[in-house]
Image (cartoon, grey):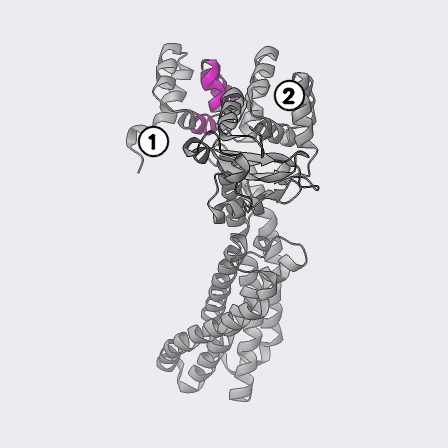
């Protein structure tokens, strides 16, 4: 849990900037880690954030900048003079720089590329040549590559000579004469091996690898499952092109999970820090889905209108409409959320659709039987046994149906190329409301003969 001092640090920084207390700002910066500074800079407006950022020394400036999300990175860059602008971009890791330029407006992207050294511009352009959202945009090409025929002693000399320019040396790619990936070797394995041993004798040839054009999120999930520090990336001819490191994989998973959570709640994802996001921006992100849902909710109104005659004959049926729609919506939302999450982490695949539908239908049935017993007691006490039977039977049918709808819609969405999270809990709930009323009134007609 954050202490009160930590919680108020953003307000303290803002007060120091507004008071133009440069000494106080420098002391504040010295007392905080780069990730803490970045978090506070994302909470304040860009004109306030620029003041402490400019007071950072060069090394910490880069560390803090790379901790910022792309939206705030762009705001910082726009406030820097030309020299500082280009020095900062030149110092960035190629993968971080490529993602920043790829997401930046054309004005910033053009200015950024023009100011880079030829070597860094070539490296950045190569990464930007990969499809958006692919592993190629997130991998680092700055690695220490070992040939499979090197001795361990010679390999360690290569690591010492080139390691300072690499983003990571813990996982080392091993290649053959054609630069085709033979596998990887861990630095720890090199250190404990005899100097005269050959790299090809200790290389892990079965290490998972991904193509540079594959979705980055899937690669990050694979890294998580395989407990890897870094994953080798290859081109279409199995030639090594880079490494996906664990810090980038964690960011990918966090971003994907945040997006899924937003979509499951019926909202569009909002980039950047929540505290810094404006009211209009947040409302815009949520309004589209709400408009769609209110249109979809007219299905419920149409169903009620279609069974108006039935309600006039047995007005007591109307008492249980909110309970039934709420119960069905909740069951459907639970199923949808569970399956979206299972899809994200690879626990469920498209071919599992029949198995998932069968399992969830039984889960829904069990929940329906449990809730029907309670509904029967409530209904009997309020309106009598004849209506209570209708309500109880409807609860069983609606819960079963809702579980099937909630579990199959994300899988069907994935099959047609739509993000399963788009089939969010509010949408499932709205659809289950309308179909649940159809079930309710149909059961009432069958049992009561109205």
Q: Which residues are magenta?
A: 38-63
In the picture, the quarter occupied by the N terminus is top left
Q: Nearer the viewer, residue 19 or 183?
A: 183
Q: Secondary structure at mark 2?
A: helix
Note whether residue 224 is visible. Answer: yes
Which numbered disc covers residue 205? none
Q: CA distance from mark 2 to mark 1?
A: 39 Å
Residue 252 pos. (x, y %):
53, 41
Residue 186 in percent (x, y) is at: 47, 36
Check disc 1: other Cα within 10 Å, few if <14, some if 14-19, many if 20+.
Answer: few
* Secondary structure at numbered mark 1: helix
Residue 93: name its quadrant. Answer: top right
Query: Which circle's residue, 2 or 1, is located before the other in the chain?
Result: 1
Q: Residue at x 47, y 66 (%)?
A: 331
Q: Are marks 2 and 1 in contact (CB under 8 Å)?
A: no
Q: Quadrant of residue 357?
A: bottom right
Picture coordinates of residue 441 (x, y %)?
55, 79
Q: Nearer the viewer, mark 2 or mark 1?
A: 2
Classify 395 as above or below 300: below
Residue 278 coordinates in the image, percent (x, y): 52, 34
Give above or below for 431 relative to 188. Answer: below
Farthest front residue in view? 196
Q: In this orientation, which residue lies closer to the viewer: 278 or 298?
A: 278
Query: Which residue position holds label 2?
Result: 120
Q: Pointer 1: what residue?
A: 7
């Amino acid at each position: 849990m954050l202490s009160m001092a930590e919680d108020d640090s953003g307000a303290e920084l803002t007060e120091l900037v507004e008071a133009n207390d440069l000494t106080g700002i420098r002391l504040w910066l010295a007392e905080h880690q780069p990730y803490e500074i970045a978090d506070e800079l994302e909470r304040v407006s860009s004109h306030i954030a620029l003041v402490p950022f400019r007071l950072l020394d060069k090394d910490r400036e880069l560390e803090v900048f790379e901790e910022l999300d792309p939206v705030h990175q762009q705001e910082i860059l726009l406030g820097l003079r030309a020299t500082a602008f280009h020095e900062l971009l030149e110092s960035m890791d190629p993968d971080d720089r490529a993602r920043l330029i790829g997401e930046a407006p054309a004005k910033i992207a053009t200015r950024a590329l023009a100011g880079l050294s030829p070597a860094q511009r070539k490296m950045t352009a190569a990464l930007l040549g990969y499809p958006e959202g692919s592993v190629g945009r997130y991998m680092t090409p700055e690695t220490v590559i070992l040939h499979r025929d090197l001795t361990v002693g010679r390999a360690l000399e290569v690591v010492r000579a080139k390691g300072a320019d690499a983003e990571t040396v813990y996982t080392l790619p091993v290649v053959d004469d054609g630069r085709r990936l033979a596998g990887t070797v861990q630095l720890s394995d090199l250190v404990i091996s005899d100097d005269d041993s050959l790299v090809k004798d200790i290389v892990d040839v079965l290490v998972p690898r991904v193509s540079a054009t594959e979705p980055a999120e899937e690669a990050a999930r694979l890294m998580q499952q395989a407990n890897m520090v870094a994953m080798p990336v290859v081109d279409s001819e199995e030639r090594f092109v880079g490494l996906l490191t664990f810090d980038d994989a964690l960011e990918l998973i966090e971003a994907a999970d945040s997006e899924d959570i937003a979509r499951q709640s019926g909202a569009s994802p909002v980039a950047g820090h929540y505290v810094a996001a404006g009211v209009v921006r947040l409302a815009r992100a949520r309004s589209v889905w709400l408009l769609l849902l209110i249109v979809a909710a007219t299905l419920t109104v149409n169903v009620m209108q279609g069974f108006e005659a039935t309600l006039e004959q047995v007005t007591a049926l109307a008492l249980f409409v909110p309970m039934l729609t709420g119960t069905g919506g909740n069951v459907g939302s639970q199923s949808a959320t569970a399956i979206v999450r299972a899809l994200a982490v690879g626990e469920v695949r498209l071919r599992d659709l029949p198995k998932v539908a069968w399992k969830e239908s039984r889960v829904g049935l069990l929940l329906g039987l449990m809730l029907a017993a309670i509904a029967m007691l409530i209904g009997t006490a309020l309106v009598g046994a004849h209506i209570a039977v209708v309500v109880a039977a409807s609860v069983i049918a609606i819960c079963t149906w809702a579980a099937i709808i909630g579990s199959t819609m994300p899988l069907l969405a994935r099959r047609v190329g739509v993000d399963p999270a788009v089939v969010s809990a509010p949408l499932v709930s709205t659809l289950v409301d309308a179909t649940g009323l159809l079930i309710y009134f149909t059961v009432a007609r069958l049992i009561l003969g109205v």
